[in-house]
Image: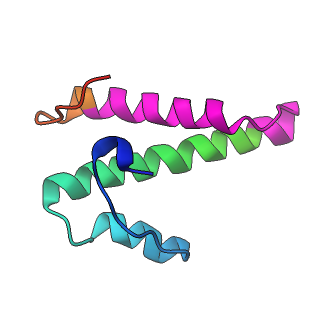
Amino acid sequence: CYRWLDLVMAQHNNPKQHFQQHYAGSFSKAVSNKAMSIWCTITWRIWQHRNKMVFTKEELDLEKLWNIIITRSWVWLSSKVQDFGYSW
């Protein structure tokens, strides 16, 4: 899910290990901070979409969800990380 940032890594199935991979992975601090930001964005947006499905009966739209995740991640990273050099 990080191909759009040119990051390639195997993902854990266990949620705790998946989180730790982003927090204390084998990346530099800068890359780890970016990965953690994206992880938090993904988790938060999936949770929000889940709530919409439960409480307002919104349909699951994976393409829309993925586009929101990429957009929010890009906006946050481009405004908070000085060396974030990926264009839209």
Figure label count: 0
Residue 75 vertical position relative to residue 49 in the rendered view, above or below: above
The colour scheme is rainbow
Residue 10 vertical position relative to residue 3 in the rendered view, above or below: below
Please give the range of residues in magenta.
52-77
Overall secondary structure of the magenta section: helix
Asked if the stretch drawn in magenta spans residue 16, the answer is: no
Q: Residue at x 73, y 44 (%)?
A: 50
Quarter containing the C terminus: top left
Could you tell me residue 1's position as x and y percent?
45, 51
Of residues 86 and 58, the one drawn nearer to the viewer in this rendering: 86
Residue 35 vertical position relative to residue 83 in the rendered view, above or below: below
Decide if residue 63 is on the left or right side of residue 72.
right
Q: Residue at x 37, y 72 (%)?
A: 20
In the orientation shown, which residue stands out farthest toward the right? 57
Decide if residue 31 is on the left or right side of residue 75.
left
Decide if residue 78 is on the left or right side of residue 49.
left
Q: Residue at x 34, y 54 (%)?
A: 36
Of residues 41 and 8, the one drawn nearer to the viewer in this rendering: 8
Could you tell me residue 82's position as x and y percent?
12, 33
Decide if residue 52 is on the left or right side of residue 34.
right
Of residues 87 and 25, the one drawn nearer to the viewer in this rendering: 87
In the orientation shown, which residue stands out farthest toward the top? 88
Asked if the stretch drawn in magenta spans residue 64, the answer is: yes
Q: Residue at x 15, y 59 (%)?
A: 29
Q: Quadrant of residue 21?
A: bottom left
